Image (cartoon, rainbow, N blue to C red):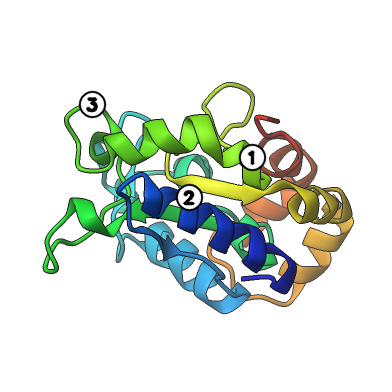
């Protein structure tokens, strides 16, 4: 986590604890190589690839363009993940599940009746007090709504504006990215839909 996001997060964690939650990050900082492995795994079918309704897709049966489109619904391009900045967290309530529970970060876990539904409601009301917001609400961005993904606005907004198509293109130029030809041919459009456009607080 970025050093300047840590204190606000800990303050939010203390407030959540007073409300009965054990607020924790299921995922936080993720480097370029980790995001590249996620991307390439989904492109080849080694990792699960899901459609916009959460249905499992068969990557090998899809064109490169269709694979790229499907991946971007749930996962960022390497170099474009907000998790690279140390400002974004996938949040859960550890009190809501047993120690052996495998967190999936799915809509069902945060929907009414799901283990993290009470936390989702609490964060919706309280996160902004600490500078955090949900960038993916399924309204403006091409990314599906993610009730678990929170971003520290004061730092993340600066990073988002600094990440131009040119910066992203330079980061990807030498990377062994699967589907690279398709990505680079459409990079300005992909950047506009999946990086520049978010659901602002």
Which image quadrant for residue 90?
Answer: bottom left
Q: Is residue 183 above or below residue 108?
A: below
Q: Position of residue 176 (x, y in %)?
A: 60, 75
Find the distance from the CA under tag 2 to the CA under tag 3. Answer: 22 Å
Secondary structure of residue under mark 1: helix
* Closer to the eye: label 1 or 2: 2
Find the distance from the CA under tag 3 to the CA under tag 1. Answer: 24 Å
Query: Earlier along the polypeptide chain: callout 1 or callout 2?
Result: 2
Residues packed near mark 2 inside 10 Å, few (<14), some (14 to 19) or many (20 plus): some
Which image quadrant for residue 46?
Answer: bottom left
> Tags 1 and 2 in contact by the CB under 8 Å rule?
yes
Query: Earlier along the polypeptide chain: callout 2 or callout 3?
Result: 2
Pick the residue in front: 184 or 198: 198
Question: For mark 3, what is the residue?
Answer: 112
From where the camera sits, is residue 81 visible?
no
Question: For mark 1, what is the residue?
Answer: 129
Secondary structure of residue under mark 2: helix
Residue 72 placement, left or right of 190: left
Q: Position of residue 197 (x, y in %)?
A: 72, 34
The residue at 66%/75% (across/down) is 175
């Amino acid at each position: 986590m970025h050093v300047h996001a840590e204190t606000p997060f800990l303050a939010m964690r203390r407030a959540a604890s007073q409300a009965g939650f054990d607020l924790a990050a299921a995922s936080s900082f993720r480097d370029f190589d980790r995001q590249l492995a996620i991307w390439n795994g989904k492109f080849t079918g080694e990792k699960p690839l899901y459609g916009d309704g959460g249905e499992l897709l068969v990557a090998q049966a899809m064109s490169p363009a269709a694979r790229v489109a499907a991946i971007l619904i749930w996962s960022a391009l390497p170099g474009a993940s907000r998790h690279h900045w140390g400002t974004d967290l996938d949040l859960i309530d550890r009190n809501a599940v047993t120690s052996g529970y495998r967190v999936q970060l799915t809509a069902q876990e945060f929907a009414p009746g799901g283990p993290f539904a009470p936390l989702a409601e609490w964060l919706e009301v309280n996160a902004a007090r600490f500078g955090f917001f949900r960038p993916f609400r399924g309204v403006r961005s091409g990314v599906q709504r993610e009730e678990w993904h929170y971003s520290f606005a004061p730092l993340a907004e600066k990073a988002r504006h600094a990440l131009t198509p040119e910066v992203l293109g330079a980061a990807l130029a030498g990377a062994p990215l699967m589907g690279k030809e398709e990505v680079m041919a459409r990079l300005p459009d992909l950047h506009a839909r999946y990086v520049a456009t978010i659901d602002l607080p």
